[in-house]
Image (tube, helix red, strand yellow):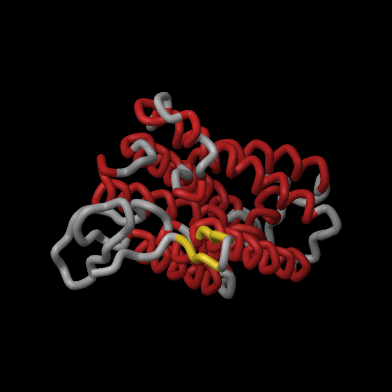
Amino acid sequence: MTAVPTSIHLGPFVFHLYGLGLAIAAYVAYVYSRRRLVRATIDISPFFRYTVALLVSGLIGARLANIATNWGYYSGHPGRWIAVWQGGLASFGGIALALPVGLVLKRKWWPQTSMTRFTDALIPALIAGWALGRVLGPQFMVAGGGHVTHQWFGMHYAGQAGRRVPVPLIQGTEDALLWLTLLKLETTNLARTSGIVTAVAMTVWGVVRAIDERLLLGQQSQSGSHGVQLAGLALTAAGIVLLVLRIRTARSTPDRSVDQVV
């Protein structure tokens, strides 16, 4: 069976589908985020600069984390350090660097908007972009599959022997379901308290990512399996803490419309 393609050739030009897919997903997330910010009456004039800063810091962090957790390979192949078109972006490494950058710039450019109101507007768009990115990105990279499987849903990936669990498609579906859940949550009275949507997204995405790493990728992951699992559980724990705090705040506020500087 033919493996999932990783590039297309148009004359002398080679287009790596992994990078092209991530670029499409990033653009969709950007446009969707702008619309959500406008709907939340948040100023979008600095948002393009904000997006560029997040993308650059996220890519750098994701790549550095992948290199660090696979140093045994990269130490002998320095020419591969920048070969991101072959895959090798650790999700939590990107988050670890983009998060402080995003927090600093948010306080600089949106000082009057509470942090939770800002993240509630952005996170559903980021989850939607992430869902699309999993399907259009890692699905077409070298070694994009998970464990070997003999089930009907197994797929062949370049750089991997045998049929593999289609992890990118599974994770894309998970993220799409989380996005729909967040949209549904926004229609409830509970979401009138800022931070609830953010907390639910953190809790669910963190635990699902940790489970995926454990069951679908495990030690075959190129992103540092144990580190990803621990980071996922840490994100879940932070989400639970935020959820409890915001629910307590909602209960102590008669009109349940809470937008504090949190």
The structure residue drawn at horizontal position 28% and vertical position 49%, both measured from the top left corner, is: 217
Q: Residue furthest front?
A: 12
In the image, 205 versus 195, the foreground residue is 205
- The answer to whether residue 204 is above or below residue 222 is below
Q: Residue 122: where, in percent of width, then height?
A: 65, 59
Q: Is residue 114 left or right of residue 143?
A: right
Residue 162 image offset from top left, x and y in percent: 19, 58
Question: Percent position (x, y) of residue 27?
Answer: 66, 64
- Foreground residue, 95 or 110? 95
Which residue extends farthest left? 150
Residue occupying image coordinates x 73% and y 65%:
34
Q: Residue at the right extreme?
A: 45
Q: Residue at x 50, y 50 (%)?
A: 85
Q: Nearer the viewer, residue 68 or 161?
A: 161
Q: Is residue 162 left or right of residue 103?
A: left
Q: Is residue 55 left or right of 224 when viewed as pictured? A: right
Q: Please identify the quadrant where the N terminus is shown.
A: bottom left
Residue 124 seen: no
